[in-house]
Image (cartoon, rainbow, N blue to C red):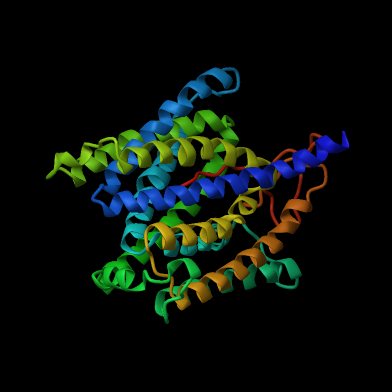
Amino acid sequence: MGVGKVLNEVKPYLYMVLLQVGFSGMYIVSVASLRRGMSHFVLVVYRNLVATLLMAPFALLFERGVRPRMTPLIFLKVMGLVLLEPVLDQNMYYLGAKLTSAGFASALVNILPAVTFIMALLLRMEKLRLRSLHSQAKIFGTVCTVAGAVLMVLYHGPVVQFPWTRGHHHAAAAAAASQSSASWLNGVAMVIGSCVTWAGFFILQSNTLQSYPAEMSLAALICGLGTLMSGAVALVAERGDMSVWAIGFDTRLFTVVYSGIVCSGVAFYVQGIVTQVRGPVFVTAFQPLCMIITTFLGSTILKEETTMGSVIGAAIIVVGLYSLIWGKSKDHHGKPGAAAVAELPTTTPAPAADGKRALAADVETPPVAKCAY
């Protein structure tokens, strides 16, 4: 029994490490395909189509008796989730990564927990006690995260030479020189915008799961409706060139299948499970691992440059990230008797194991699920 308990404690960590490896591969292959001319609008459509085909059969089979009745209010919430995540978030992130780099985008996306925390504060879903050490850690972490992001944007500095990138500097510099400062800043704005919409997705999804507690079915609905909505957007955006819809047996097809199965289908479900047990801030705590792997793969495969400003800014963001996570740890451990707790709050508390409503130290927080890029 003791071994089983240890395995249950280790599983969330193992799942998240494997997912970060999967995300790193997605960042690399998607940027490679986008730079070879693939439309990010089309990529989003095909990615969600593959995820729908993967998730729908399992949702119909395993959640037949769990899935509640769809009401107009729930449907409106689902449409809001579709607009935030597949349509806005994925399109903005892909465009941002294309205009900057896979390594830079994976580093900047670490501001996500701080953006979510700030949004929860603005919506009065999170309460701070300024005399509390944990609340001070939240504030310090948020400030550090924002400062690191600003440093990454404003300061570049010299190029960092890794042992495996020696000899590739001139080729990478020539590619970087061809990219204008305006397009790079547009890419930064797209990545930050994707973090804002992703944070909004967290908060709305946590509320939706209160009235529709079927994670796999919700994931299938988001992917399916996301395919239709992003398809309509893509038809309008790419109306002048219908050839962008054609994909062959090359990196574009691999990107679509890989992203749909690993980063939309599997990640939707696995992250939903981990989030219910440990909360969404625990899930985002593993983003720095993805950043490290992506930077290594980007500099090796895509010949991307990594500047000193990006390294310093990313390090500050990581410090702020873990400070925020430590501050949120009280929300997770402060609920006696609750088996599954999420750190991001909503207005409705989760039931405790004894049948009563459990109260967190700072705020009431029910389980939520998380979407992946």
Residue 5 in picture, x, y percent from top left: 82, 38
Asked if 185 appears above or below 297 in the picture, the reply is below
The quarter of the displayed image where residue 328 is located: bottom right
Q: Residue at x 41, y 52 (%)?
A: 28
Would you say 33 lies left or right of 89 here? left
Asked if 77 appears above or below 92 in the picture, the reply is above
Residue 337 in view of the camera: yes
Q: Residue at x 38, y 71 (%)?
A: 167
Would you say 195 lies left or right of 326 here? left
Quadrant housing the N terminus: top right
Front in this rendered view, residue 67 or 294: 294
Would you say 215 lies left or right of 254 here? right
- In this rendering, the count of numbered labels is 0
Residue 219 in picture, x, y percent from top left: 49, 34
Front in this rendered view, residue 302 or 130: 302
The quarter of the displayed image where residue 210 is located: top right
Q: Farthest residue toward the front?
A: 167
Asked if 325 appears above or below 358 in the picture, the reply is below
Asked if 224 appears above or below 174 in the picture, the reply is above
Residue 357 in view of the camera: no
Q: Farthest residue toward the left?
A: 240
Residue 69 in picture, x, y percent from top left: 52, 22
Q: Residue at x 32, y 73 (%)?
A: 170
Q: Residue at x 35, y 45 (%)?
A: 87
Residue 371 in picture, x, y percent from top left: 50, 44
